[in-house]
Image: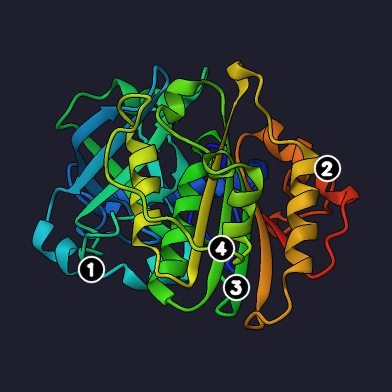
Amino acid sequence: MPRPHLLHASLRPNAGVLLVLGGSAAAGFGYRYWATASKDTDSAAAESTTLHPALFSRYTIAAREPVSSTSTLFTLRARDDPAAAAQQDLRDFWRRAVWSVEAKQPQLQIARAYTPLPPLPTSTDASAEELRFLIRRERGGEVSGYLHRLPDGATVELRGPHVEFAVPEDVREVLFLAGGTGIAPALQVARALQMRGGETRMRILWASRRREDCVGGSSDADNEGASGGWRRWLGLGKQEQKKDDDGEGGVKGVIVKQIEALKRHAAPDQQLAVDYFVDEEKSFIQPGQVAHLLQQSDKSAAGRAPGSRLILISGPDGFLDYWSGRKVWAEEGEVQGPLRGALSRMDLKGWNVWKL
């Protein structure tokens, strides 16, 4: 997951890898960049009235909805020029990439990247006027703690969009391993595939610390037996269109509701399945489950439309350590680095792995 960093003029290569300037020299440059910009403008004014990849713009906390005891869904709305933000079309970002924006912590002069949740499938608004973020209040997290302490109506400065990963146009199959708030980029990918159309299959394995993070979530592998769930994802069965209700287990959490909305919105040739794993229930994603999915996908590949296959991983550092190893720092910034962890010991022929 992205870490807080000193404010800087960020760079982006064509491949879409997030580069963050690091080290004492870069830190000095970052501070001077912000300080110089402040001298040239009114300190009470934002650097940009609309979302901008190099300048900060002001948003207001329009709403917040508790997701769990540690996580909140923030809705931020453009403050200085909502009409201009409403005309800023982000549709191309939603369709093509996993992307983030930086939120500023002004007292400490740091910023942290957060991944917006995609608009609901029924929404036609793809503008920058309103953005939603699932943010966990981390222990010792300077930016997440700052955001959670702000009252409704407070101003938050954002900078972006920044492309973290450009989803290939020819992708036909995605296996996404998500830990905690790593579900946000998973939902971005699911929405991007739906916006493009065509035959696709995506399965999300979402690991949460507590059931409160995913209350009401029911794994597709369990709904009609494990084989039935896998068969639907592999394109060997029809995906069931679920009703919009609370289910037998009571109300559903806000993220689970969005997942269910995406599943209902999927076209007949778009397979989307989600399985839930909860630490406190001793339910964990097992390497054997992932290996089995890959093997079954290989067996059922005959007759499908050609295209690339992706394994994406997003979550806390420990989650990445276990599955793929973390990204590493190089002279040009943060890069993918070698594949380690459980995935490195599997047969990944035909699959491309990307750490988010």
| Residue visible at 72% across and 73% down in the picture | 301
Would residue 72 be found to the left or right of residue 25 on screen?
A: left
Dots 2 and 3: beta carbons under 8 Å? Answer: no
Judge whether 215 appears above or below 16 on screen.
Answer: above
| Residue visible at 37% across and 47% down in the picture | 260
Q: Which residue is mark 1?
A: 88
Q: CA distance from mark 2 to mark 1?
A: 41 Å
Q: CA distance from mark 4 to mark 2?
A: 29 Å
Instruction: Evaluate whether residue 97 shows in this view.
Output: yes
Q: CA distance from mark 2 to mark 3?
A: 23 Å
| Residue visible at 81% across and 42% down in the picture | 288
Quadrant of the image occupied by residue 65: top left
Would residue 113 be found to the left or right of residue 57 on screen?
A: right
Q: Amino acid at mark 2?
A: Ala
Q: Which residue is mark 4?
A: 237
| Nearer-N-terminus badge (4/2) | 4
Task: Indicate which label's residue lies in the foreground, 2 or 1.
Answer: 2
Judge whether 69 appears above or below 6 on screen.
Answer: above
Q: Which residue is mark 2?
A: 342
Which quadrant, please, contains the N terminus?
top right
Mark 1 lies on a secondary structure that is: loop
Q: Which residue is mark 3?
A: 172
* Other-residue count near label 2 (Cα within 10 Å), few / some / many at <14 / 14–19 / ≥20: some
Would residue 183 be found to the left or right of residue 62 on screen?
A: right
| Residue visible at 35% across and 28% down in the picture | 248
| Nearer-N-terminus badge (1/4) | 1
Toward the viewer: 75 or 112?
Answer: 75
* Other-residue count near label 1 (Cα within 10 Å), few / some / many at <14 / 14–19 / ≥20: some
Numbered label attached to residue 225: none
Toward the viewer: 306 or 141?
Answer: 306
Q: Amino acid at mark 3?
A: Arg
Dots 4 and 2: beta carbons under 8 Å? Answer: no
